[in-house]
Amino acid sequence: MSNRIRTLIVEDEIFVALDLERILEDRGYDVVAIAADRQEALAHGACCDVAFVDINLRDGPTGPEIARTLAEEHSVKIVFVTANPAQIGASASSAICYVRKPFGEEAILAAAAMAHGEDRRNASVIQLNRPWAGD
């Protein structure tokens, strides 16, 4: 299906990544890849519309650095996934919203809808910016 929203998951905890993948695919999103680091994430950046990005990755650049590159170079809409929202800091400008870990299915789906431009409110999703609201 060509009109499916192409989604990238940038998460180094495999069980969290697989949970995100299941939630999104069950609702018709096309998960193009699960990336555990910068190289994998950027390799798929041109192929996705939305990226769910963990703030704290074990190796190399942080999630916000990867998110900024994805947003600037590929116009990917960013949703941060984090247990510690205080770490988002100045990186908030590259994201539409964040979802706090542990997350529920409805929070992930609300964030995905928000990134796609739909107004779908959920108390677990914190809206940061709407830089693509005019798209």
Image (cartoon, rainbow, N blue to C red):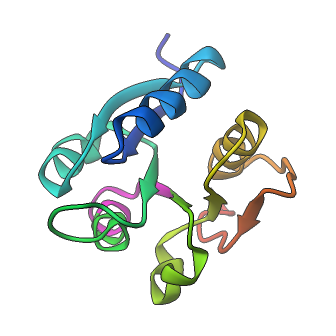
Query: Magenta span covers which residues?
Result: 70-78
Whether 1 is drawn above or below 85: the answer is above
Q: Is residue 33 left or right of residue 85?
A: left
Q: Is residue 93 left or right of residue 106?
A: left
Q: Nearer the viewer, residue 134 or 115?
A: 115
- Most extreme residue toward the top is 1
Where residue 77 appears, x then y in whole percent? Answer: 49, 56
Where residue 98 appears, x then y in whole percent? Answer: 62, 63
Q: Residue at x 50, y 79 (%)?
A: 88
Whether 72 is drawn above or below 75: the answer is below
Give the image quarter of residue 15: top left
Whether 15 is drawn above or below 71: the answer is above
Q: Is 76 included in the stretch rendered in magenta? A: yes
Q: Is residue 107 left or right of residue 1?
A: right
Please indicate, yes or no, whether residue 61 appears anywhere in the rendered image. Answer: yes
Q: Residue at x 47, y 39 (%)?
A: 16
